[in-house]
Amino acid sequence: MSSYNYRSNQRTNTNRNSQRGGRYAPRNNRRMGQYIDPSRFVKAAKPVETLEYIAKYQFSDFAVDDLVKRNVAAKGYVTPTPIQDQTIPLGLEGKDVIGIASTGTGKTAAFALPILTKLIRDKNSKALIVAPTRELAQQIEDECRSLAKGSGLTGALLIGGTQMGPQLRDLSSNPSIVVGTPGRIKDHIERRTLKIANFNMVVLDEVDRMLDMGFINDVREILSQLAPVRQSLFFSATMDSKVKSLIESFSKEPIMISLKTGEASENVNQDVVRYSGDSEKLEKLHDILISQQVEKSIIFSETQRSVEKLSNMLIERGFKADAIHGGKTQGQRQRALNRFKANEIKILVATDVAARGIDVADVTHVINFSQPQSYEDYIHRIGRAGRAGRIGHALTFVN
């Protein structure tokens, strides 16, 4: 084959596990909420001043495969981001790497270029890339496919919400690269449709979110079955004790690259919206959304049902909105996300779990129509505004 053969299929899996999330749903995603003092939702943005980063390399300098280099140039990539500039040379040397960097900093290319180069040059090598959500796995798959165009490499995308048939077909062709979420990867391993004992490269992207979502046991089991001699690349926005323990157990003398200068929330103006009843709450949301300041927003609500209901009410009021939650098929979720990225809609109503992995740089507002379960969840939510050096806004409704 002269082209990269990922066969991503977005058709609905009609079995009950897929419709309800089943074994592929994150563990413990319905936990008791903790009380958060509303004063913690009020804070002025304090952007961190950072020195301009001067890249040591250009993409043309990297010792990547010539075909990959041509695809990189065709995408218009010239100067690497800091995480790419520092990670790619180490990855090409076969080093284990820990990258501490925020979402949206170009991590995918940072690990994809070394991995694809090795796969092209060594036909016996195989790579497994694990991501916490369907959306992030899909984004990684898209990027890898475009960077390896024309290489002849084959791959498989293993995520929930899609039919098993195409995944089984792709796995039967003995792919050199597999991208997926922990639950679906583990399911294929248990079905014996995926054997990873000879996979000698592994990437864990957004490790901290993967562990937050309850995938720690699945991830440990997956890593324990890989080839004992392998290259491991771990990427995370934070490095707490859980993340550190996991990485230390499954890597060999990793080199750490830390480029995180502060919390994403530091670029976000935070405030509360007080209301006294459901009717007033909806009217206040309406008034906020028609403000000229609100260009593009993600609205968080607690349950799948409340997300769907709120999205429909906003559409009835004339807003360009859509919903994303675990009850939707992967195809529906991806279409909503694509519409949001393309500015066909300006409002995306979401649950916490479904929103993880969404990387949209131009979100101006995050609105917590329902309060988050924990302050950590709150920080994850509001970090979706104020990206790429912009000042964002977060509003939390408080009764």
Image (cartoon, rainbow, N blue to C red):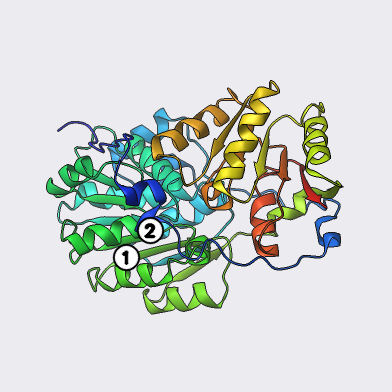
Q: Which mark is residue 164?
A: none
Q: Is residue 15 left or right of residue 83?
A: left
Between tags 2 and 1, which lies in front? 1
| Location of residue 149 (image quadrant) | top left
Which residue: 27% across, 68% down? 230
Nearest the eye: 203 or 60: 203
Numbered disc 1: secondary structure: strand
Image quarter hosting the N terminus? top left
Residue 316: x %, y % from top left: 66, 23
Q: Residues within 10 Å of mark 2 (few under 14, many from 20)?
A: many
Residue 32 place in picture, x, y as percent = 62, 67
**Type of the residue with mark 1:** Gln
Q: Which mark is residue 231?
A: 1
**Up-down: is 56 above or below 28?**
above
How far is the residue under mark 2 from the one under mark 1?
A: 8 Å
- What residue do we see at 30% from left, 37% from top? 8
Residue at x 18%, y 43% (from the top left corner): 170
Is residue 330 visible in the rendered structure shown here? yes
> Left or right: where does residue 229 sit relative to residue 70?
left
- Contact, mark 2 vs mark 1 (Cβ under 8 Å): yes
Query: Where does residue 221 sit, x and y in percent of width and height?
Result: 31, 72
The x and y percentages for residue 38 are: 83, 60
| Crowd class of label 1 (few under 14; some 14 to 19; many from 20; radius 10 Å) | many
In the picture of the structure, the residue carrying the numbered disc 2 is 91
Identify the secondary structure beneath mark 2.
helix
Q: Amino acid at mark 2?
A: Gly
Can the viewer see residue 159 in this picture?
Answer: no
**287 relative to 241, above or below:** above
**Residue at 50 percent of width and 56 percent of height:** 86
